[in-house]
């Protein structure tokens, strides 16, 4: 489970993880969920709205779909899929608790992806597909109260270096699990 603000480098890390991890891993993220929603839910009070200053506001229809999404991701993991989730915990600790509930009983590696807000804002401009201000507004708030097994910082580190650090942690967990003789659950990058 990767959590970080917009333009923090999560997507690049995910692509690198898929390339270096020895088994196939599915990459699923909040952007996948938003893209799958009906257009009417985007820019809607009931769905999700991105304000001109980069704030993200979610309504009850989005919250319901997001909960179903988390349960669906957990079901895929329970069915044996290796899953990397790329998310933005807009609710900080409350967002993590929602995921913890959905992923109960599964093995999860919680990874914080940090990036200096000025660097993320520069990436946001370079990407051209984000509302200006989103990266700066999310850089710190998404980490408030969230507990991690590992934190990587993309301010100066490349995606591949961060992915190697995460892959090492995943491999260590899998080795411990094999030594205990317990069955595989969720193996998350």
Image: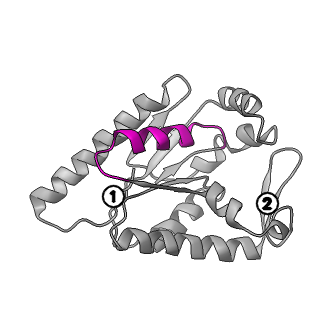
Report the magenta residues as a range.
6-24
Question: Would you place residue 58 above or below residue 119 in this image?
Answer: below
Give the farthest residue toward the right: 52
Q: Nearer the viewer, residue 155 or 159?
A: 159
Displayed quadrant of residue 135 = top right
Place of residue 129 in the rendered image (x, y in percent of width and height, measured from the top left): 76, 40
What label does residue 154 carry, if any? none
Q: CA distance from mark 2 to mark 1?
A: 31 Å
Q: Is residue 121 above or below residue 138?
A: above
Q: Which residue corresponds to the image point at 51% horizontal and 74% vertical from the top-left?
A: 72
Q: Give the mark nearest the N terminus, 2 or 1.
A: 2
Please name the residue that numbered disc 2 is placed on: 57
Of residues 80 and 155, the one nearer the viewer is 80
Nearer the camera: disc 2 or disc 1: 1
Q: How many marks?
A: 2
**Which residue, as the protein is rendered here, is positioned at the far top?**
156
Whether residue 18 appears in magenta in the rendering, the answer is: yes
Residue at 89% over, 46% down? 52
Q: Is residue 124 above or below residue 72?
A: above
User: What residue is rendered at 42% in x and 70% in y?
Assistant: 76
39 inside magenta stretch: no
Image side of residue 104 versus residue 67, left or right: left
Which quadrant of the figure has residue 17? top left
**Residue under numbered circle 1:** 187
- Is 120 situated above or below 10? above
x and y percentages locating residue 170 in the rendered image:
30, 48
Residue 131 horizontal/vertical position (percent): 81, 42
Question: Does dot 1 land on a helix, a strand or a loop?
Answer: loop
Q: In percent of the image, x 63 and y 42: which residue is there?
A: 140
């Amino acid at each position: 489970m990767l959590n970080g603000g917009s333009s923090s480098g999560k997507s690049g890390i995910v692509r690198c993880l898929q390339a270096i991890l020895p088994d196939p891993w599915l990459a699923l993220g909040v952007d996948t969920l938003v893209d799958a929603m009906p257009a009417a839910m985007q820019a809607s009070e009931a769905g999700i709205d991105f304000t001109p200053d980069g704030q993200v506001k979610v309504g009850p229809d989005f919250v319901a779909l997001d909960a179903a999404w988390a349960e669906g991701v957990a079901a895929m993991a329970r069915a044996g899929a290796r899953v990397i989730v790329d998310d933005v915990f807009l609710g900080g600790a409350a967002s993590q608790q929602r995921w913890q509930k959905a992923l109960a009983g599964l093995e999860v590696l919680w990874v914080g992806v940090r990036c200096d807000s000025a660097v993320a804002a520069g990436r946001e401009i370079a990407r051209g597909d984000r509302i200006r201000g989103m990266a700066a507004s999310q850089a710190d708030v998404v980490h408030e109260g969230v507990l991690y097994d590992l934190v990587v910082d993309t301010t100066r580190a490349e995606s591949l270096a961060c992915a190697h650090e995460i892959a090492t942690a995943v491999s260590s967990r899998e080795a411990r699990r094999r030594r205990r003789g317990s069955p595989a659950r969720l193996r998350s990058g």
